[in-house]
Image (tube, coloured by chain):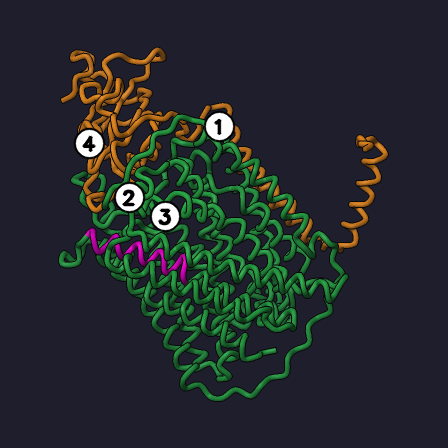
Chain colours: A orange, B green
Amino acid sequence: MQIRFPDKKWFHEKLAGLGGEMSQLEINELEWKWLVVSLAMIGLFVGAIVVTAVSHGIHPPSHVETIDSASLHLSQEFAEDRLGVQPTPLADGSLQVRLVAGRYGFYPREIEVPAGRRIVFRMASMDVLHGAHIPMTNMSTMIVPGYVSEVVSVFPKPGEYPMLCNEYCGLGHDHMWSKVTVVAQENWRAHATGGEQP
Amino acid sequence: MNDATTTRLTLFNFWVAFGAFGLACFFGMYQVLERSGLFAFLQSPAVYFASVSTHGVLMAFVLTTFFIMGFGYYTAVHSLRQPVWNPRLAWTGYGVCVVGVVLAAVPLLLGKASVLYTFYPPIQANVFFYLGATLLVVGSWFWCAIMLVMLARWKKDHSGETVPLPMFATAANALLWLWTSVGVALESVFQLLPWALGLTDTIDVGLARTLFAWTLHPIVYFWLIPAYIALYCYVPQAAGGKLFSELLARTAFVLILVLGLPIGFHHLYMDPEQGAGWKFLHMVGTFAVAIPTLLTGFTVIASLEMAGRRQGGAGLFGWIGALPWKNPMVLAAILSLLMLVLGGFGGIVNASYAMNAMVHNTAWVPGHFHLIFAGTVVTMYLAVAYKLWPELCGRKLYSGDLALVQLWGWFIGMVVMTTPWHILGLLGQPRRISAVQYNSVLTLSWDPYESLMVIGGFILLISACQFVYILYKTQTAGEKLEAEPAAADDAVRPTPAWLNGFTLWNRVILVLMVLSYGYPILQFFVLKTYNPSAWGY
């Protein structure tokens, strides 16, 4: 079988054929203009997203990391005494927070973090599907049993924030929330206590 | 070409569709009341989540599937001028669907299937719920087969001729549904059913969510295409004009079919089991599928403008006033386009790869999809019912004025109900809660919007009851209609083969589906995954 590689002539023939077909379509001038406007609009939106994703590294939580939900309590990372705000910051200065989601709460139930600092949340479910969201911030992730969810956020303002479960997880779902207290950097107790929680 | 078989098939399908719709509106009313927290005696998570599950299944699966099947039989017979191919098969499909609905309804109403309409493993529903949902899908495949056979037979008898636009779009929808329902069918047959029957102990939730995402977005286009058929094929004539461009219409349907399929991951943006690159790819596709909707908006509005000017409307906006606003089809088109614009903005926020984090799973999301589905799509379904009911029953529409009031009520109710939802979403209220139990200062700001939502729900319920009443009265007490001579169709322009059939497009879809879902599904068989066991509610 002979394979014909597309050369210049082939390209011109194809283009002429397509042009002939297109001119048969009798597409109204206004339609063309609108098509161009539509494409430009979509291009603008996608372009804005590409810029933020590539230049600022803004991505949705997509940490494909599996874990056995049934034995979280025996694991290195999510054992009961290793949860909460970690005493040692990560290499880049971020604070790591480990939480377990289970019906009906995020454990530990209360955490305290400093404002203006990069916080890396690592979460796993011990039973069903959950979702974690701190309203009016971009701290949001699904917590799927069998996977570790990792999400990064910075809270600019001190205050008390609820961390809500935003995915239906059973009849007690309405009650599933934990308290996140954001304090000014200089008031953050962990400086003195080594991350021990209130 | 109104033979008795087509009339009966269409009516039987529509009865189930609109019966489900009326019933689901009562569940919806209960939900806004319960959730508002204004009536303490209504508070019950068990009843609320059973109600949400039933409302979702009735609206999204029962109303849509039966409406689309009924409308499809009517459209195929009328536009091809051929009787339904193999009516026995059509009735069998109908029967399978009805049995499926009944099987699913029993556990739903007993609160044994409160898994909402997106299923949610590892929370496990009664096996009859999964079985019923599966049968509903399987029954609808009979309809798809009949539509495609009718198209193929017509093309064989009319070689070289252009397929009429309504049938072209209906066949596109049948193909779309076959392609998209495979995802949920695989989840159901290989994961949910064996697991609910106790044949397997655990379930791969990541895989289940990925398969459901395959179905979850294109299913919306399955619901939308009949509304677009009405916008393209009924509205211009009803407004006293004609379709601005049939080619643009065909292009829009093909683009929805091809681009609408491989984009489901924007429902998984916040999930940990898929990588960022795949989500990014599906994001680009999601924005691309906005193009056919932008084309549709343009073509339908251009057709309305031509009609308005033909009736003496002058100036930049004068044609809008000159449109026949008292024609239910025209009114429905205007109102549903308005809601499409509002809902479309919300959709662009949802689809945005990073912005989604702010609104994911908040009240914003039901606000958006109630505008698009309950607003744009259902409004056109209602208008189609007003157009077809007299024809199917041979009686005049019971009251044209009441129909107009009903459509306005549906529009106003939808705006009043979804506006507070959008605001609540920005304030962070989760979508799937039965009551606000958070002892937090932030959540106090949610209170004022809850009462507005109840008013919207109440207007919608009244409007839905009016609709069912008008259909009932038309059928039982309407004046007999004189048979009208069928209007001659406009001559169809020659159309290039790639806008007259689907062979090429099926190949393109196959390639796109393998590219966008191949590895994301394969990874669950390559990675070391851990599956959880079943949980009750």
Q: CA distance from mark 1 to mark 3?
A: 39 Å
User: In the image, is A102 to the left or to the right of B361?
Assistant: left
SS assignment at label 3: helix
Q: Are marks 2 and 1 in contact (CB under 8 Å)?
A: no
Mark sitting earlier along the chain (1/4): 1
Amino acid type assigned to the residue bearing label 2 in the image: Ile
| Circle 1 chain | A
Q: Are marks 2 and 4 in contact (CB under 8 Å)?
A: no
| Circle 4 chain | A
- The verdict on a common chain for dots 2 and 1 is no
Q: CA distance from mark 2 to mark 1?
A: 34 Å
Please tell me how crowded label 4 is: few (under 14), some (14-19), or many (20+) other residues with Cα within 10 Å. many
Disc ID at residue B123: 2
SS assignment at label 2: loop
Give the residue at the far right of this rendering: A9
Disc ID at residue A53: 1
- Judge depth for marks 2 and 1 and give the one in front: 2
- Judge depth for marks 1 and 3 and give the one in front: 3
User: In the image, is B407 to the left or to the right of B127?
Assistant: right
Amino acid type assigned to the residue bearing label 3 in the image: Leu
SS assignment at label 4: strand
Q: Residue at x 16, y 20 (%)?
A: A197
Q: CA distance from mark 3 to mark 4?
A: 39 Å
Amino acid type assigned to the residue bearing label 1 in the image: Ala
Q: Are marks 1 and 3 in contact (CB under 8 Å)?
A: no
